[in-house]
Amino acid sequence: MQTLITAKANEKIKSAVHLRDSAKARREEGMFFLEGARLCADASANVEIVRFFFTAKAEEKYSEEVSLLRQKAAESCEVSEEIAAKLSDTFSPQGIFCVCKTLDKKYYIDKIYSNAKIIALENIQDPANLGAIARTAEALGVGGAVLCGCCDVYNPKAQRAAMGSLLRLPFITVEDMSLAMKDFESRGYVTLSSTPSDSAEDITKTSLGEKTVCVIGNEGNGVTDKTAMSCMHRVRVPMRGRAESLNASMAAAIIMWELMR
């Protein structure tokens, strides 16, 4: 089914914008918003597409992606350029948008514990950092992620930064990271807590186990003391320059490289 939408007051448009802007709406409705030809096309392999919006220009420029998304979506809606501008959250909209159902994470639990190398993220608040870490984790072959107190994974900025990785990388959310680390330790994992402190072990010289999980903390405050104390080792990325610390996503990238090396 395909319709043409030209009115900004259309309920489908208002609903899509609300999902784009509100984490609460995404949680309550079990749906999220995606934008972009490649991201939407890639997502179609992993998520259920409830509604697909596209412009005539997008259909001409991204014919392959539009054709695929029409087949995958329960409903397809052509929109005017004016409506596309209302839907878009980017400076250069491509005219392709999807409303999708959030993933059922129950089946990820066993996948997480069956993987040898895991990244854990505590209180990461910048969606771009969260997305970048997920993208790097998938690229390096990290088995999954544990999230505690982080920003919404379905935030559009996180999804764009992840380029689909947040829809493919297994992840679970926990209420207490310190308890999660104790659980991993009981399962035979070496647990690490990252810190910029000079008193911590150099990550390049730390004896890593076959099964390892490392916690990356909040952009400003790092890993909480409670979580750090629950881990077997505190590790740091060695730095020779004058900067006191690294961006969370950069620190995570280096640590994940060491975990997989």
Image (cartoon, grey):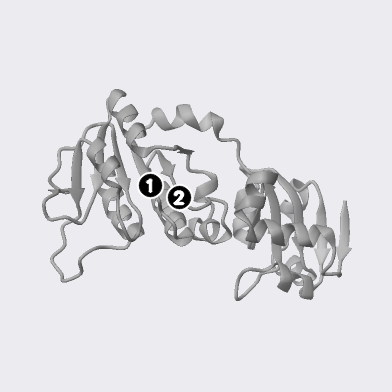
Image location of residue 174, percent across then percent down: 44, 37
- Is residue 145 shown above or below 253? above
| Residue depicted at x 55% and y 35% | 105
Residue 49 shown left or right of residue 255 in the figure? right
Asked if residue 65 is positioned above or below residue 232 in the image, the reply reads below
Left or right of 156? Residue 150 is left
Disc 1 is placed on an element classified as strand
Can residue 87 be seen here? The reply is: yes
Question: Dot 2 surroundings within 10 Å: few (below 14), some, or many (20 or more)?
Answer: some
Residue 150 shows which numbered tag?
2
Locate the C terminus and report the quarter of the image it occupies: top left
Query: Is 227 situated left or right of 99 in this image?
Result: left
CB atoms at circles 1 and 2 under 8 Å apart? yes
Q: Position of residue 75 (x, y in %)?
A: 81, 50
Residue type (three-letter) at the residue carrying disc 2: Cys
Q: Residue at x 36, y 48 (%)?
A: 140
Asked whether residue 64 appears in the rendered view, the answer is: no
